Amino acid sequence: MSISKKDVVAILSADGDQIPFFMEKACHQRSNNTVTYSKNVFLPISNVCRNDCGYCTFRQNPQDPKTNLLMYPEEVMKIIGHGHDRGCREALFTFGEHADENPLVLEALKKVGHETILDYLYFLCEETLNKTNLLPHSNLGILEKSELKMLKEVNASMGLMLETTSERIMKTVAHQHSPGKDPKKRIKTIKNAGKLKIPFTTGLLIGIGETVEERAEALLEIRKIQDKQGHIQEIIIQNFCSKPGIAMEDHPEPSLADMIRTVAAARILFPDCGVQVPPNLNLEVAQIFLLTGTDDWGGISPLTPDHVNPEAPWPELKELKSLTEDLGFKLRERLPVYDKFINSQYLSDVVLENI
């Protein structure tokens, strides 16, 4: 798809009557009248992380006795079992990037018979596929190509937020203590997932100090990868939210107009992908994003909180259905892998069998 940086910046800088113009243009890019969601359970395998982002509340101090060093197999499978009983179809696995670099996490892993956290994750995904109707989706930070290849065998899809391509942000409070947020490393992971034909979710984190030009560059970088690899199923536009106690507590949140402009740009740039705005972070204005081309609500759990944003509960499905249908759209449950990727090119035999 050919669209210039100048064109994207124009959308991201729109004001006045231009905003509804781009909203309407974006909405016309929708492929149908359906808005999807995935019914899931959210499993934070470890809250230890080598990164220390200025906006994060997921990361916990490994020295704190209350820290979740490692979820043990019984606990994980109990939650997944409850999800199975409630009709969930996605097991969202996540942990802090390179959590097993910490000796306390390594010690906990050895207690459950595993040398690395990726080996442990493989085991949990395999158990999920063998014993339940849930499909694993893993979101783990930057990974090597060999690690992605291993995990493809037991995952229906995977994800990594690009967040931003701005090297400058690495020197700010947002990412100055986060080596894993180096844009080059994250781009490499996303590209490698494409080379391996892994259905993938990525996106931007809006409002962490990036400029309009940098936001345009990030969207265009994802578009460039998609044009070459074609494996990206979904673009998430997530807004920075201030929280008590974070380093960026006093940092301003992005405006509604900023979010509208960015969602419109994403929809126009990615007619071949789902576009998602997290509903629990934007429930009061969620309908506006439907009118700007959003066609997916992402994972919604009837059992587990959003462990990345625990202060923001998931909307009830009844509420989500109501606000979606109020505008004439149809709400439809989906799997963690989009329909067009359900084939032997993108999925392993065991995942395909489960589907």
Image (cartoon, grey):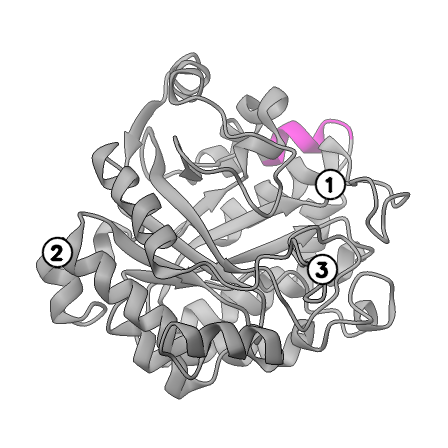
Percent from the top left, x then y, of residue 36? 34, 35
Q: Earlier in the sequence, mark 1 or mark 2?
A: 1
Return the residue nearer the eye: 119 or 178: 119
Magenta segment, which residues? 16-22
Q: Alpha-carbon distance for marks 1 and 2?
A: 37 Å
Return the residue nearer the eye: 258 or 67: 67
Q: Secondary structure at mark 2?
A: helix
Return the residue nearer the eye: 2 or 225: 225
Is residue 4 in view from this perspective? no
Q: Identify the residue at image location x=70%, y=70%.
A: 51
Q: Which residue is mark 3?
A: 64
Q: Which residue is mark 1?
A: 241
Q: How many marks?
A: 3
Q: Quadrant of residue 196?
A: bottom left
Which of the numbered marks, if any, corresponds to residue 29?
none
Q: Identify the residue at image location x=48%, y=33%.
A: 27
Would you say the magenta stretch is mainly helix, strand or loop? helix
